[in-house]
Image (cartoon, grey):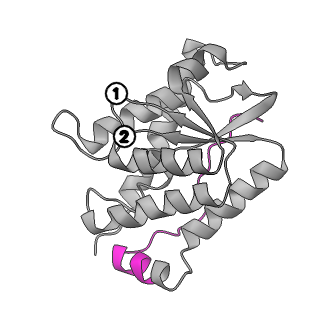
Amino acid sequence: MGKEVLVPFGNLTTPAQDRLIARAEGINPFEIFYERELERLREEGYYLMFFCAPLKASVQKSVQLHSLEALEAASQILGTSWNGKNVSLWIPHLHALPIFNEEMFPQLRDVALSFNLLLLRNRLFDGLLIFGDRISSGMKNEIIVARDIGMEILNFDYFLEFAEDKPTEKVAIHYFEHLRSISDSNLRRISFP
């Protein structure tokens, strides 16, 4: 308990066009999977945390570098507790990027952003954790939605300082390697149109 990372089971990867069609028809299996898993974790008593970090490429950083930084930061807080509950993280860089890969398919960026906003608006999370050296336009929208629905909004450094049951450095390195292997595996499964 407390170290949950959501990963879809089975081979649900489809070509980008099929994902867009499925989304338009309201039957995206990834969205259904994640919504059900988040609801299950909430029922089990987890503190569900949305990991809000930059992803869009900038002059200074690529999408891959943003993803690695987010996964490295997330590895420092896996297994933590907040407000007396074990924390489960939703990491868009790990969960949404393989589904809506905006680097390979730029037209999917808006779909990915709307998916994350939908999850937030559906009040599936207890808190939103802000990480990174800048606030991107996507992050800004996520923060606005979280604020508007009264979600707890925390800065990563504050959370890291006050969270309970933080992993040791050795364990955090293991978590990072695990998260990176999931991310790499997900990206290898993406089908080209």
Residue appearing at x 59%, y 65% in the figure: 10
- Badge 2 vs badge 1, beta-carbon distance below 8 Å: yes
Magenta residues?
1-21
Residue 46 is marked as none
Residue 54 is marked as 2
Identify residue type, mark 1.
Asp
Residue on which disc 1 sits: 133
Identify residue type, mark 2.
Pro
Secondary structure type for disc 2 = loop
Q: Please report whichever mark, 2 or 1, sits nearer to the chain's N-terminal start.
A: 2
Occupied quadrant, residue 18: bottom left
Q: Is 173 positioned to the left or the right of 17 in the image?
A: right
Residue appearing at x 55%, y 67% in the figure: 30
Q: Position of residue 132 (x, y in %)?
A: 39, 30
Occupied quadrant, residue 147: top right
Q: Position of residue 134 (x, y in %)?
A: 33, 32
Secondary structure type for disc 1 = loop
